[in-house]
Amino acid sequence: MSRSLRYCMLIATALVGGCKQAAPGDVAAPDVPQATQVVLGHPDRRTLVDSVVMNGVTTYTNRENIRATVTGYVDRIGVQVGSPVAVGQELFVLQTREAAILGEELLRDSTLNITGIVPVVSRNTGIVTQLYYLVGDFVMEGDILAELTRPDALAIKLYVPAERGSLVRAGNRVRVKLPDGRLLSGTVGRLLPSEDVNSQTAPYLVSLTTSIYLPENLNLIVSVPARVSRDALTVPASAVQANEVQTDFWVMQLVDDSLAVRVAVWPGMRSDSAIEILNSPLTIDDRIVVTGAYGLEDSSLVKAVPHL
């Protein structure tokens, strides 16, 4: 047999094999649905507080005036604005008017028994917030040399809108948020006898439970409790799903090891991380999808995994 004839037979055999069809009895394998990976959790019971946010400003309710004890001149100043002061600390040194008139030579005469130098000391601790005189200035006895602010006199002036007046009462506990994000607790005190005409707000004094020094007139955010739900059944906020118009809400409950079904819920109060659910058949023993529920259809196949 010639070489060219053998090539033709090999090509024909390959064509016949390639055109072979599947046998009538052969059936394609069905598509197996893939399980969606989810993170599971449980409903919880806790106390939720619905708060109203109001504006507050730092203020100091107790200031001490440091006064000149003699008439004369400011010889030395031992502090500056912002300096912390201890009890008995020397703040100023004054030279009496008589000493200034007599001159240094006469002051050095021991027979006269005149020094002409009078120190002014602090009677309390605090922080210097104002200085009213410089070295060399003339002062009269009783003049205010400086202002001392006591850190324990820090308070928050809470501005309560007129329509929210029923929410604030003396003794109420509030939360104060500082500009850096720190949270402090406070207690509502007395209502001040004044009202801001422009904003129609009534100012209350709020005392802080934590001793801290803050500059005066610092704007703060104060959360005032408006409604409390005790022993509320809650779920993580990520577990609650809704339709586009926010009329239907549900969570995905695991009914066996791999099947998640929709359970209708109605949201109540909310916090940063949890949502209260009302009139729900769920209990704290049920398993729900807390991560991965978005887009799941009813009766979806899922696979529980650790926190993603």
Image: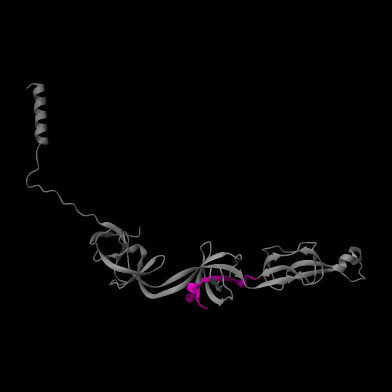
| Quarter occupied by residue 257 | bottom left
Q: Position of residue 161 (x, y in %)?
A: 50, 71
Q: Residue at x 38, y 67 (%)?
A: 274
Q: Quadrant of the C terminus?
A: bottom left
Q: Is residue 131 left or right of residue 301?
A: right
Q: Is residue 108 left or right of residue 194?
A: right
Q: Nearer the viewer, residue 137 or 166?
A: 166
Q: Is residue 250 left or right of residue 179?
A: left
Q: Residue at x 27, y 67 (%)?
A: 263
Is 78 magenta? The answer is no
Task: Give the number of callouts.
Answer: 0
Q: Position of residue 43 (x, y in %)?
A: 33, 69
Q: Nearer the viewer, residue 27 or 293?
A: 293
Q: Nearer the viewer, residue 49 or 247?
A: 247
* Magenta segment boundaries in residue numbering: 150-173
| Quarter occupied by residue 235 | bottom left
**Colour basis:** one colour
Q: Position of residue 228 (x, y in %)?
A: 42, 75
Q: Quadrant of the N terminus?
A: top left
Q: Residue farthest to the front?
A: 197
Is 161 magenta? The answer is yes
